[in-house]
Amino acid sequence: MKFRFLTIVSLAVMTLPVNAEKRLHFDLDYHYNLGLSQRIMGISMSPNDVDYMEGHSLHFALRYDITKRLSAGAGIGIDAYLSGAGNYGKTPLYATCRYKIITDKSFFKGLYGFTNVGYSISGRPMYRGAMFDLGVGWPIMLTKNFGINLQLGYDLSQSKKHPTTIVYTLPDGQTVVEKTKKDMIRHSLSFGVGITF
């Protein structure tokens, strides 16, 4: 019984590349994240409050076409979030899902909606925390299996135990500086360009 099961599984795995050849996709994307706001200790800050707020992401994903319109997969990335209030990095592992909105032969053929949901693994100087992306994308195919990918979306990034300096004044006029670690949330508008094959 075990031998039959292993034989069936082995045959299925060996035939997968043949059947999946045109259904398997690799994506390499760069994103510029224009910071809209960030929140730490219940205080919201805009880019004007901290001089600047931006980010840069490089993501690699492997996707499989489940149907003609729907594909799903997994990815890994390197993210850097910069602001006048401090910088932090993340290495997210995430699940990705795309749904093609337009599949006919129009100019915007392949236009899709996408979402990425994941969590960043920790390790210095990277921080743990959730990540979420939602947006639209458009692959401009240069050949049958290679194209340029454009994306516009929303990026949510959480940084757990982000180093924070708190400065406050006591009633007697004494200034106190406290270094602590607090969770931070960043909201950004994301502009992406990449390759897909």
Image (tube, helix red, strand yellow):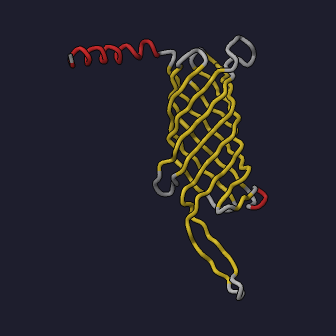
- Numbered-mark total: 0
Residue 30 quadrant: top right
Looking at the image, which residue is at 68% across and 33% down? 135
Considering every residue shown, the one lying at the far bottom of the view is: 172
The quadrant of the picture occupied by the C terminus is: top right
The correct choice, above or below, for 120 with respect to 177 in the image is above
Residue 51's x, y, as percent?
75, 60
Residue 192's x, y, as percent?
67, 36
The correct choice, above or below, for 151 with respect to 197 in the image is below
Looking at the image, which residue is at 67% across and 14% down? 103
The quadrant of the picture occupied by the N terminus is: top left
| Image-based side of 42 in relation to 58, left or right | right
Is 47 in front, or is 143? 47
Residue 146's x, y, as percent?
58, 21
Residue 53 quadrant: bottom right
| Image-based side of 171 in relation to 184, left or right | right
The correct choice, above or below, for 54 with respect to 103 in the image is below
Is 182 in front, or is 92? 182
Residue 5 quadrant: top left
The correct choice, above or below, for 108 with respect to 89 in the image is above
Considering every residue shown, the one lying at the far right of the view is: 48
Residue 144's x, y, as percent?
59, 14
Looking at the image, which residue is at 73% across and 61% down? 50
